[in-house]
Amino acid sequence: MAKYIVMAEEGELSLLDKAREELGLVLEGATLIYTGVGAINVIRSLQHIDREAEIYNIGYAGSANFDIGTWAQVTEVRLNHPNVTYNEPKLEIHDSPFTIQNCRKAICYTNTDFVLASDYKDCVFDMELAFIAALGFKNLHSFKYVSDNLSLHSYHDLTHGVE
């Protein structure tokens, strides 16, 4: 079975070393794909990948209350739409086949823009995972490294990512 590491930007590459060192992830032989930030980039980058492939999404995320530098293993992903409620499917993320230590389990809320404030606690925020999950990959795993506490400035200082 094909194995892929899916990251939004090249600036996240250093997270692979952190994931190996701090979480014990061993992803040798995996093909690395940078999707770009956001839904359209994710869909264009991953639409042709076999849905049976093993996908490891590793990336930065914000959190209202997790300490910067915390790893979160995502158990479920939802879109973040705090102003409206509508019916949408629950997208569960698979447990890792690795024994993971030093990692909190959390829900990830995916957004179409950077989250600067939220009442949601004990979760992480990103801009890609719900779109990856919605493509229907059967072996999707996700690990997010908390880069900021909902501060674009802090995120940019750490990652030199989107502005």
Image (cartoon, rainbow, N blue to C red):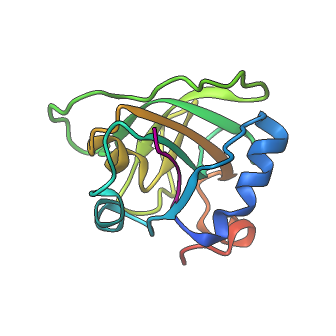
Q: Is residue 130 visible?
A: yes
Numbered label tally? 0
In which quadrant will I find the N terminus? top left
- In this rendering, position of residue 39 left or right of residue 113: left
Q: Is residue 56 above or below residue 6?
A: above
- In this rendering, position of residue 88 left or right of residue 48: left
Question: Where is residue 55 shown, x and y percent of the image?
Answer: 48, 43
Front residue of 19/149: it is 19
Farthest left residue? 87
Q: Is residue 117 above or below residue 136?
A: below
In which quadrant will I find the C terminus? bottom right
- In this rendering, position of residue 39 left or right of residue 23: left
Which residues are drawn in magenta?
A: 1-7
The question of residue 2 being in magenta is answered with yes
Question: Where is residue 46 shown, x and y percent of the image?
Answer: 34, 57
Front residue of 99/11: it is 99
